[in-house]
Image (spheres, rainbow, N blue to C red):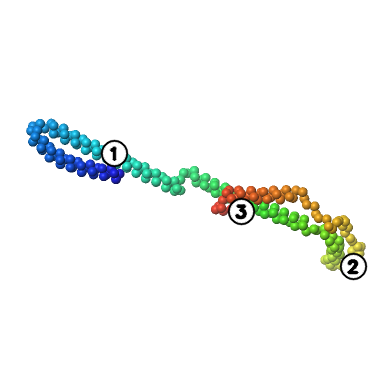
């Protein structure tokens, strides 16, 4: 556009100079040609046509510049409009709501998965603790403590009823719990499927961590 305006101005100045020179030349030619004015008119028309052609070229370039400027402005406006939610496509709004619902569901499932994995890990820890505690060790002492529970129970039962345990005939008979003979040094048998379940739990935890890194949203509120 700047080039076209400069060219128009340059052409106009050139035309003024040419007209001034042409006027002086026309006066001289008229004096030299006498009554032969056709030759002078033809020369003047040719110069005028060339000047008009140069101006037309500049105007064409100016119009092309204006069209390109309008296209650029239209593109910039359209790009800004795409980022404006006021001018978004009508189908985007329900899709955005659906995405929010799915995000909340994903957070709920993730919370449930974490709770389940934590519970499984807790139970596995209890099993391992029981296996390592050697519950059969000092088995005879444990039998004696269990036998004493019967006497304590009889006394509490009689007092609740307002009776003297010594006057209760049923309590006069000694009672003894018969326990099986066991090897105090024998450890509990480890379940054969426990190791496989612990391995599966470890794989599930690793897979959950991998998926949660990109599939679980961080900004949506949880329903749980």
Q: Residue at x 86, y 61 (%)?
A: 140
Q: In this figure, which residue is indicated by the disc labeled 3?
A: 224
Choose the circle earlier in sequence order: 3 or 2.
Answer: 2
Res. 14 mark:
none
Residue drawn at 89 percent across, 61 percent down? 175
Residue 81 x %, y %: 42, 46
**SS assignment at label 1:** helix
Q: Secondary structure at mark 3?
A: loop
- Is 22 placed left or right of 97 in the picture? left
Residue ID for mark 1: 60
Residue 151 coordinates in the image, percent (x, y): 86, 64
Which residue is located at x 57 percent, y 47 percent? 102
Between marks 1 and 2, how big is the CA–CA gap? 127 Å
- N-terminal of the pair, mark 1 or mark 2, is 1
Work out whether residue 171 or residue 144 is closer to the camera in this orientation and state it.
144
Q: Position of residue 121 (x, y in %)?
A: 69, 54
Residue receiving disc 2: 166
């Amino acid at each position: 556009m700047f080039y076209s305006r400069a060219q128009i101005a340059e052409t106009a100045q050139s035309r003024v100079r040419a007209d001034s020179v042409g006027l002086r030349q026309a006066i001289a030619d008229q004096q030299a040609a006498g009554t032969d004015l056709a030759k002078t008119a033809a020369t003047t028309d040719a110069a005028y046509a060339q000047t008009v052609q140069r101006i037309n070229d500049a105007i064409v370039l100016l119009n092309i510049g204006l069209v390109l400027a309008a296209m650029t402005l239209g593109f910039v406006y359209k790009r800004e409009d795409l980022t404006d939610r006021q001018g978004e496509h009508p189908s985007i709004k329900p899709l955005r709501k659906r995405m929010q619902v799915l995000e909340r569901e994903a957070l709920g499932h993730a919370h449930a998965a974490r709770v389940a994995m934590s519970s499984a890990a807790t139970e596995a820890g209890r099993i391992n603790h029981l296996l390592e505690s050697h519950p059969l060790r000092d088995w005879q002492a444990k039998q004696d403590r269990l036998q004493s529970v019967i006497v304590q129970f009889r006394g509490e039962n009689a007092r609740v009823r307002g009776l003297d345990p010594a006057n209760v005939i049923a309590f006069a008979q000694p009672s003894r719990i018969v326990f099986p003979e066991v090897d105090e040094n024998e450890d509990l048998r480890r379940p054969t499927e426990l190791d496989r379940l612990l391995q599966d739990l470890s794989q599930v935890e690793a897979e959950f961590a991998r998926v949660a890194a990109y599939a679980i949203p961080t900004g949506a509120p949880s329903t749980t």
